[in-house]
Image (spheres, coloured by chain):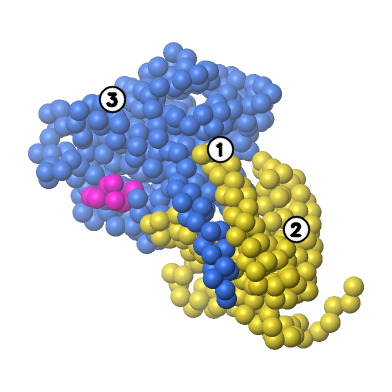
Amino acid sequence: MPERTRFPIIALLSLSLAVGVARPSGAQESSHAWESVGGAALGTASGLIMGSLGSLVPCNDTYAGPLCVRWVAAGGAVIGGVSGAMLGSRDPERLGDAAVGGGIGLAAGTLAGFALTPFIERWAPQDALAVGLIGGAVGTAPIGAAIGLGAGALVGAVLWQTIPSFGSPRAAAFVLGGIGLGVLTEWAVRALTADEGDPPLTLGFHVAF
Amino acid sequence: MSRSDVRAGVAVALPIVIAGCIGPYVTSRDLGDRACPAVRDSAAQALEWHAPTSAGDRRNLEAWCAGVGPVIADTLPAQPSRALAPGDSLRVLVWNVSGGGGDLVAFLESEAGVTCPATGPAPPFVLLAQEAYRRSFAVPAARPGTQVSVAAAESPRHNPRIDVEHVARLCGLSLIYVPAVRNGAAEYDDGREDRGNAILANLPLHDPLAIELPAEDSRRLAIAATLRDAAGDSLRVVSFHFTLLPKLWRNLTTGNAARVRHALGLLDALGSIEAARGSAIPTLAAGDANTWSAQDAALRRLRDAFPDSPAPLGEGTRGPFPADHLFFRRPSGDTGAGLLPGTYRRLADAYGSDHHGLVVTYLFDR
């Protein structure tokens, strides 16, 4: 299968499977069947993208390399998919928030991606879309992403400055890995606390729209 | 969490794991429907070509190839060193010239001991170069659909900028030059520019080979030649240049597989070359792997295939990054020829390039 078509096909296949499996699950357990399906789809996509992005640099240093990235992406998709299905069936309102955040992230990321076109040689529309997809994945769990970014950047910067052989690529790995881990953690935490009322991860200030 | 939730997760992950294989990297001597003159014309016929078999790779490579000029294969040096005798040492240099940024003449005079213009024989050496450039009207004007790379970044020079063809002629060296891409779209009074891999030596270059690596970002190559001593013992030298980073979409969708595909493509081609010749000879492969870590997955696979390689240097060759590497293997059971221990090191001066060169001494079998 050509490289350029493999992952979109896998993603579509994953989503269709999620739909196929999650729908009867939701139908049996609650009246939120389609929310469960939507949650599984959104969580899968978000986990897949974040698993991929977060593992690019660390996996580069392993023998498995790209296969390592795929395995982590698969793990991310599982965590995201299961968490999304649980969240959808138990707390559709918070799933709706995640979907709105994802949409905003997708739009903002895609715009930013296209804005990069004049500055990067042979930057293609699909590269702009990739930025959009990353933005969308981050947007589904922005608090986790922000915490992960901050923690990853802090730890990465400290290690970079204190260990001479550490290097800036590994610092970047901490940043990207932190974002990925933060997004997946927020999905998991939301799913596991879905019956408990207020979300456990909240901003300490209110953003008025 | 219900059993259905778990089932959903497993079902989602399964196809991703099943599909988790690296993209195609197999190469073949059959160039199929490739039409690019640089792989088809009479100059190209001086080399044995190996190219990826994947149709997508070939389409991509064809668009880049259309922008470059003909191969140069001047395999006999005008100013040769003395003939290699059994047990002789050979200085092997590796360097990314960075287009016209690196001062190739100064590099050769200081590191190889040659004089330019050539005035007499120098100790035997071979230089495995990447990003060497050529300016000539033999480089065709870019047509619609031709991919043109931006010119290699160059720092200002205090002396004349001389292309690889003229340097080889000036210094009396043998030269195999295989351009990979156009070096910018500019048209100059004296021609257009392309850049690619080169092997320069003051020894005859036998059995020249060109290997197109799997298409990732722009067109990348490995080229090879064989050096022989008076007893007929041989050393195959390979100059390779891998990609740094493909664009974001490709990087995400392939799991950052670019350099691993390049390494596997190179190993596949070298394997089929040895199989076709019926025997393996000592092989030294070196070049710019564009790695940011010495533990890169591509390097790990190359080290597996080249078990007699020296240990990584542990210092950067492009800024802090260990981009350039050298690998070596000899046929199993052959313990004669090899790298002289303690001679593998990074060159202190970058000669205007953004890369420092590497050097090692090779000893032919006694």
Q: Which mark is residue B218?
A: 1
Q: What amino acid does circle 2 point to?
A: Leu
The chain letter under disc 3 is: B
**Residue under numbered circle 3:** B206
Horizontally, residue B240 falls left or right of residue A143, namely left
Horizontally, residue A145 falls left or right of residue B341, namely right
What shade has chain A been given? yellow
* A50 or B330: nearer the viewer: A50
Question: Per the image, is B303 magenta?
Answer: yes
Quick one: SS at disc 3?
strand
Residue B354 x, y percent position in the rendering: 51, 49
Q: What amino acid does circle 3 point to?
A: His
* A7 or B150: nearer the viewer: A7
Horizontally, residue A145 falls left or right of residue B364, namely right
Residue A37 x, y percent position in the rendering: 68, 62
The chain letter under disc 2 is: A
Find residue B281 and report its image quarter. top left
| Alpha carbon distance from label 2 to label 1 | 29 Å
Question: Do callouts 3 and 2 mark residues in contact (Cβ within 8 Å)?
Answer: no
Residue A105 x, y percent position in the rendering: 76, 62
Residue B56 x, y percent position in the rendering: 54, 32
For residue B140, say whether it is visible.
yes
Q: What amino acid does circle 1 point to?
A: Ser
Q: Which chain is drawn using blue?
A: B
Q: Which mark is residue A106?
A: 2
Query: Which residue is depicted at the point 59% across and 50% down?
Result: A13
